[in-house]
């Protein structure tokens, strides 16, 4: 499966979390990475406090 197909299949929004608080979000991963770099430079903040995750769009079904 090509990366474009995967991105379409798993569409959603990227979120930037700092200490489990959402501080930024975007549909574009590059925007979130840029925001993380600007707001939380690596030399000032440990890596385990900053997370980037994707919230999938659409319906979810529980079995």
Image (spheres, rainbow, N blue to C red):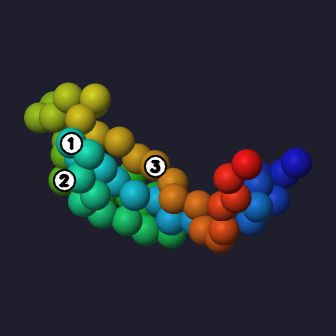
Residue ranking furthest to the left:
44
Residue ranking furthest to the front:
63
Quick check: 26 left or right of 23? right
- What is the distance, in whole Å, between disc 1 and disc 3 at their CAs? 13 Å
The local crowd at label 2, few if under 14, some if 14 to 19, many if 20 or more residues have their Cα within 10 Å, is few
Quick check: 37 left or right of 5? left
Say which residue label 2 marks: 39
Question: Of callouts 3 and 2, which one flags the residue occurring earlier in the amino acid sequence?
Answer: 2
Say which residue label 1 marks: 19
Please tell me which residue is depicted at 66% across the width and 68% down the height of the picture.
59
Helix, strand or loop under label 3: strand
Q: Foreground: 17 or 34?
A: 17
Above or below 27: residue 56:
above
Above or below 32: residue 58:
below
Question: Of callouts 1 and 3, which one flags the residue occurring earlier in the amino acid sequence?
Answer: 1
Helix, strand or loop under label 2: helix
Say which residue label 3 marks: 53
- What is the distance, in whole Å, between disc 3 and disc 2 at their CAs? 17 Å
């Amino acid at each position: 499966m090509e990366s474009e197909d995967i991105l379409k299949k798993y569409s959603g929004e990227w979120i930037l979390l700092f200490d489990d608080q959402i501080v930024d979000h975007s549909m574009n991963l590059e925007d979130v990475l840029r925001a993380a770099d600007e707001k939380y430079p690596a030399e000032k903040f440990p890596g385990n406090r900053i997370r980037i995750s994707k919230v999938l769009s659409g319906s979810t079904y529980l079995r």
